[in-house]
Amino acid sequence: MTTYDIALVPGDGVGGEVVAAGREVLDAVARTSDADIGFAWTTYDWGSGYFAEHGRMMPEDGLDLLAPHDAIYFGAVGSAQVPDHVSLWGLRLRICQGLDQWANVRPVRFLPNVPTPLRTTGADLDWVVVRENSEGEYAGLGGRNLSGRGPGNEVAVQTSLFTEKGCERIMRYAFELARTRPRRRLTSVTKSNAQQYGMVLWDEVFTRLRADYPDVETDSCLVDAMAARFVLRPASLDVIVASNLNADILSDLGSAMAGSLGLAASANLDPERRHPSMFEPVHGSAPDIAGLGVANPVGAIESGALMLEHLGQDADAARLRRAVDAAAAAGVLTPDLGGTASTADVVRAVLDHL
Ligand SMILES: NC(=O)c1ccc[n+]([C@@H]2O[C@H](COP(=O)([O-])OP(=O)(O)OC[C@H]3O[C@@H](n4cnc5c(N)ncnc54)[C@H](O)[C@@H]3O)[C@@H](O)[C@H]2O)c1
């Protein structure tokens, strides 16, 4: 039997509810798998509660504690008790950047029976947003300066960092991914008309790499036009590669097009496998619905499917996705999708269809 050693970081708000749901489903996948697999879970209670006691979101040696695990299964972070930039940088971004999980893969899947705001049915739509996850607009560079200016005159600088190596590795990842898909199509998202340094470098790297992938159809699109294209010409998209901020925004847009932010799954990958990769729903801690038992667990469950693929269990990942589709097709939908099901109802329906 192969037992995977998983670090579980529920975090804040609905994070705990959706990772508990995902864990229950993943344990059931393991029990019913032909591959003889199991999960050993180690829970780390890091987040805003930990901050209240210790003044930090995770222990100083937190990354060392995570390093030996096969993967990390993460909920969400964010609460009214800790400023958002402190909680995000102190936990999620610390893990992603500290473990160099430089590729954030965010598939957008349209489920049967789930209404979408798009004019088309969504039936043929299947996108993957590949997000640069180590630099760009979230490089954490900058500062604030009050000195000598007095109240009302503070200045802040937030600098984006684009390196040729950083652009190249995420784009090669996206090209390779596009190659594995039937349409073999890759769109690069840019803003080089206004951001004449970083984004021009981004474009130049994309143009250079195209020559190495003649079998992949490519185009480049300004981010503002891309937002409109997601809505008006969704069928023109397949794999999308974008910088940290642009992909963050577009993938939320994409998941809303699929019906709800609660559906979106993501993988924060270290493709070189030097460190554990982290799997998490795209959504945040959703304080408005936390504790009500109605959080949509599909984003977390589908993040579990991405984790299974990363661990080499593709057949079980496909089986899990079929069970999620069947539960949706049967009309077991949480309120964000217009249904009345609870988180637990969705878990039961997925377990029934596994
Ligand atoms: N990866 C992360 O940990 C992450 C990501 C985004 C936001 N955040 C944090 O989360 C907190 C709340 O941020 P926000 O409100 O902007 O974003 P959010 O994703 O938490 O919520 C946005 C909206 O989507 C809904 N929603 C989110 N997840 C859902 C689910 N599983 N089922 C049903 N509905 C769901 C919420 O109810 C809310 O109406 C903030 O502190 C923010 O910093 C964390």
Image: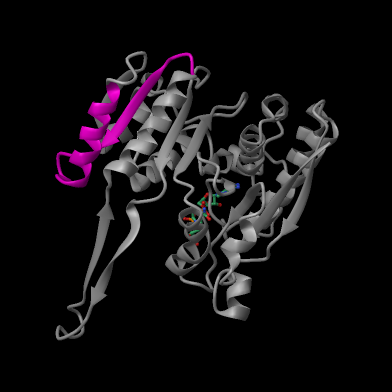
Quadrant in which the C terminus is drawn: top right
Q: Residue drawn at (38%, 37%), measured in percent from left and top?
A: 170
Image quadrant where residue 24 sits: top right
Left or right side of 308 for 336: left
Residue 329 visible? The answer is no
Query: Residue 209 at what x, y percent from top left?
Result: 29, 27
Query: Residue 192 at what x, y percent from top left?
Result: 18, 39
Residue 78 visible? The answer is yes
Query: Residue 315 at what x, y percent from top left?
Result: 70, 24
Query: Residue 267 at what x, y percent from top left?
Result: 54, 41
Magenta range is 181-210
Image quadrant where residue 213 sits: top left
Query: Is residue 95 one of those drawn in magenta?
Result: no
94 above or below 175?
Answer: below
Q: Residue drawn at (42%, 47%), measured in percent from left and top?
A: 133
Q: Nearer the viewer, residue 168 or 32?
A: 168
Quadrant in which the N terminus is drawn: top right
Q: Residue drawn at (18%, 86%), measured in percent from left and top?
A: 150
Left or right side of 266 for 43: right
Query: Is residue 209 one of those drawn in magenta?
Result: yes
Indicate the colouring scheme.
one colour
